[in-house]
Amino acid sequence: MPNFQLTTMQGTLSTAALKEIFVYTLTVNNTTAAPSSVVATNVQAAFKTAWTATTTFKNHFGTPVIWTDTTAAAILGNTNGDLAAAAHVPFSPTLAGVGSSSSPSQNAICVSFSGGAKANGTPYRGRHYLPPPALASLDTNGLMSSTVTDTIRSFYQSWFNNMLAGNLVPVIWSRSTGQFQTINQIRVGNKVDTIRSRRNELPETYSLATLSLLSGEAAGGDPDEDLDLYRWRHDGPE
């Protein structure tokens, strides 16, 4: 009987006391029906092996980016999203980027997946929003070169192949149909995506100036002159 598990990879994006976090999920077909704790451990082990094999992957993330935890939970409801209790496996040691300063926290590298086909022939699709790229991984137009995107794609191929070797099949979970489709394509585009939820989590400070409104009456002048000045500014001279 199929045993599908929803796994997460998560970590932090900042060295500040109040750290912003990133989270992305991956559904796997747990073909041996192993416990969630084993699934989480094996997904993380496959990730670590890919991290070691793809030596330049970590170069494309700044040092504040740290992978800290993996979780796995059995999917109980294909369409309603019900999950069993999750197993939690911390990274020990944690894995961190080694690149230059990160781009803004709301930025993300998007990794897209496709697999199977819907009734209309279009494939099922999924995606991961990775942490923001290191500034050095962007060109003067704010795009990633093919060297960067090829490295990210190569890392994912290695990670997924490692999971397959451990009887975990990466799939796309469609809650609207209750279908699970094996991933058969990975794509990494060269544009940086923006995640509004990450931006909203950031504390923000403002530079503020208070302006005094023009007031002819307060200054003892003629209010009609102020009105003429307003019209001139908005409508231009007659």
Image (cartoon, grey):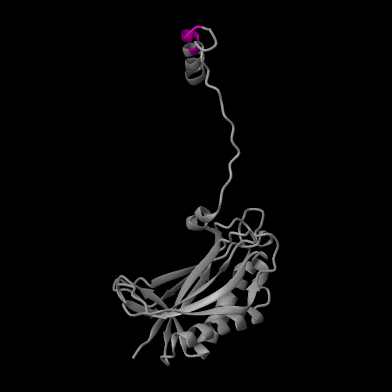
Spot occupied by residue 35 in the image (x, y as percentages of width and height) = 44, 88
Asked whether residue 224 is drawn in magenta, I would say yes
In the rendered image, is residue 98 in sight? yes
Asked whether residue 77 is drawn in magenta, I would say no
Picture residue at 55% right of the left edge, 54% below the top: 202
Spot occupied by residue 95 in the image (x, y as percentages of width and height) = 64, 74
Residue extending furthest toward the bottom: 32
Q: Is residue 161 left or right of residue 115?
A: right
Up-down relation of residue 147 to residue 219 (above or below):
below
Q: Between residue 187 and residue 219, name the one nearer to us.
A: 219
Q: Main secondary structure of the magenta part?
A: helix
Spot occupied by residue 203 in the image (x, y as percentages of width and height) = 56, 51
Q: Which residues are magenta?
A: 222-226
Q: Is residue 126 left or right of residue 94?
A: left
Spot occupied by residue 197 in the image (x, y as percentages of width and height) = 48, 57
Picture residue at 65% right of the left edge, 64% below the top: 64
Q: Between residue 66 and residue 195, name the one nearer to us.
A: 66
Q: Is residue 117 left or right of residue 126?
A: left
Number of dots carrying numbers: 0
In the rendered image, is residue 238 in sight? no
Up-down relation of residue 194 to residue 146 (above or below):
above
Picture residue at 48% right of the left edge, 11% below the top: 228
Which part of the image, by quadrant, shows the N terminus? bottom left
Picture residue at 64% right of the left edge, 66% below the top: 61
Q: Quadrant of residue 169?
A: bottom left
